[in-house]
Amino acid sequence: MTSTPARKPALAILGKRNLELGPFALDAAAQEPAPWAHWCLRTDADGIAWLLFDKKDSSANTLSEAVLAELNDVLGKLEHDAPRGVVIRSAKPSGFAAGADIAQFRGVTDIANLEMLLARGHAVLDRLDRLPTTTIAVIHGYCLGGGLELALACDYRIAIDDASFGFPEVLLGLHPGLGGTVRLPRLINPVAAMTMMLTGRTERARRARRLRLIDTVTQERHVRGAVRAAVDGELRRSKQGFAGALLNSKPARRLLAPRMAGEAAKRAPRAHYPAPYALIELWVEHGGDAEAMREAEIASFAKLLVGDTAQNLVRVFFLRENLKKLAGGAWQGRRVHVIGAGTMGGDIAAWCAWQGFFVTLADTNRNAIGGAVRRAAELYGKIGRDNRRRVRDALDRLIPDIRGDGAANADLVIEAVPENLELKRKIFAAVEPRMKPGAVLATNTSSIPLEELRQDLARPQRFVGIHFFNPVSRMQLVEVVGHDQAAPEVLAEARGFLGGIDRLPAPVKSAPGFLVNRALTPYLLEALVMLDAGVKKEAIDKAAKDFGMPMGPIELADEVGLDVCLHVAETLRGSLRRDMPEAPQWLKDKVAKGELGKKTGKGLYDWKDGRAVKSHEDAAPPADATDRLILPMLDACVNCLREGVVADEAVLDGAMIFATGFAPFRGGPLHYARSRGIAEVRDTLKRLAAQYGPRFAPDPGWDSLR
């Protein structure tokens, strides 16, 4: 007979965080082996049971079938030997629970089996809800999705001041599926509840308290006192007021639903993203009947999960996780020097300072540096409005550096000047001798091959491309560009740096346009060809948006800047062996006149208050407009895969989604091509080539895709 090894005491895995878990936590060595893999139960001297959620072999707590089955066993024990109160806490330093185990969602096709599993999960949380003793969720860090549904099944929710709450299921093409659609609108104002679920927005602890989602906010050292107050009935429970109950009435639900659907349509068209509308229909039809709502929630969730949208968005979730893993370990550097205080350089510097790095920003133009600091202050004011101290500290870390002295102490130097080969080489020649031997030199070039830029470097092995996209604060993906002389450890450092500033690294090989611009250029150029042929710009943009792109190519060109688009197009046209169309003369004339798009107020569109002014006339795109725009982008992706610019389809699909917004519900360009059919896509390209010219001729790489 083999003995079960004693489980590692929960306190031992808490790291630097000293969680208040009750008196038993002070004597971790005295704990007996737990009978459950994911839960640890102890009762303190006050008769309060502390139930620790500690998912085995995982850095984060997620709800799985096994976790819920064990919780059901724990609840049976608590029903038999009822304590004065039950506290549910997480043993993970990072947070309470991150939601469901998304891995269980992949490839699900059996609706009946899924409904059965969901019904079991509901039964467990309903059992917790009915437990004949006071139940309290003590929450630190993140409490999301299924984790929040677990907390909602408790009588009280006590939040540590760093806690955050949300239902992000809509980002996976779903809505809450373990009773969240029932409990949340009955606890807080139903409009606020629906807004949380429809947007996936995360609320910080104090905002959640104002919403009445939690009962109190406290600090770690006061947790035990707050728990005792709850058990003794001295802590006031948050309850929905009269106005909330009124808004949950049938007439109010019917009145509010169209407005909710209208707001949802601005972000997620019904044809592509059915989850928000399914949630609204659930609430309208069953919001007044908890039991009917539970049954309808299960059926709706199961139907959504087996659908293409949810399955593709689950795929996108794992594409993101794959890119995160490429960041590797934490980068050890702390100082960044950015050369060039224009839009890109200034925003790169601002983002690095926001993420905790000390940043020196160099430019020969004092006004450019001043403008960059002002933009940084505006950005921090928006993203840090609830954390003034962080705003102040970030501004303190962003250091104007007119003489460029920061290069000597920097661990990473990023060049972000205009796309001029000779200018960049001149800057490298001046800065490289001043750098520390172990520092990394990076360029933010968007199209120039690194082989041309490294020509006069003394240490080309420590030179990489780190290509950000505009706007830096919103675009998650950054290309890490390698070349045949770059040291593997330097590329790893570059990826680690990006992980340190909360960005997704996509490794690509040095080649004209790398991956993203190489794929976007034929998309943008075809839009210009169509515009030149008389197709209305609104119709062209509509074709792309109907496919699922976040904005059309005409508006995107104005956003990026027509000067930038023209430069990239001319660079790639001269570098690639493709029959790419030349940019129209009228575009060159616009650039020459300074009509560059959004940044000048006039481009292909006129711009007012940061928005493109569009005609309200109905602009129907030509029947083949979508294929003319999208398929050249797919073809360029296949070309990059064949030439080894990108290593595999997962990185390619992830990069295109997170850098260009390529319709996430389609799962990525190559995934979309496979779903549509490789042969069908290739044959359509051939038909387009016969009609419009050889620029549509399919790349040979299609023949090797299976």
Image (cartoon, helix red, strand yellow):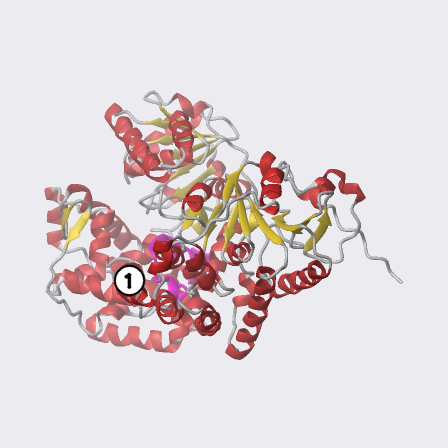
Q: Secondary structure at mark 1?
A: helix
The quadrant in which the N terminus is found is bottom right
The part of the chain drawn in magenta is 641-668
Residue 661's spot in the image, x, y percent? 34, 57
Which sits in the foreground, 623 or 227? 227
- Is residue 9 found left or right of 206 in the rendered image? right
Judge by depth and name the residue closer to the eye, 301 or 618: 301
Q: Is residue 640 above or below residue 486?
A: below
In the image, residue 111 above or below residue 154:
below
User: Magenta span has 419?
Assistant: no
Residue 621 lies, in percent from the top left, at 17, 69
Q: Amino acid at mark 1?
A: Leu
Identify the residue at image location x=25%, y=25%.
Answer: 365
Q: Position of residue 122 (x, y in %)?
A: 55, 67
Query: Circle 1: is it few (<14), some (14-19), or many (20+) Cα within 10 Å?
Result: some
Residue found 25% across the figure and 69% down from its top: 626
Nearer the observer, 641 or 133: 133
Q: Which residue is mark 1?
A: 256
Give residue 191's quadrant in the image: bottom left
Q: What is the tally of numbered marks visible in this picture?
A: 1
Q: Residue at x 48, y 71 (%)?
A: 291
Residue 421 % position (x, y)? 30, 38
Query: Is the residue 626 above or below the residue 15 in the image?
Result: below
Q: Report the predominant secondary structure element of the magenta stretch.
A: helix
Q: Is 664 contained in the magenta span?
A: yes
Foreground pick, 271 / 19 = 19
Res 644 seen here: no
Q: Is residue 493 left or right of residue 87?
A: left
User: Going by the image, does 628 lie left or right of 403?
Assistant: left
Residue 484 visible in rendering:
yes
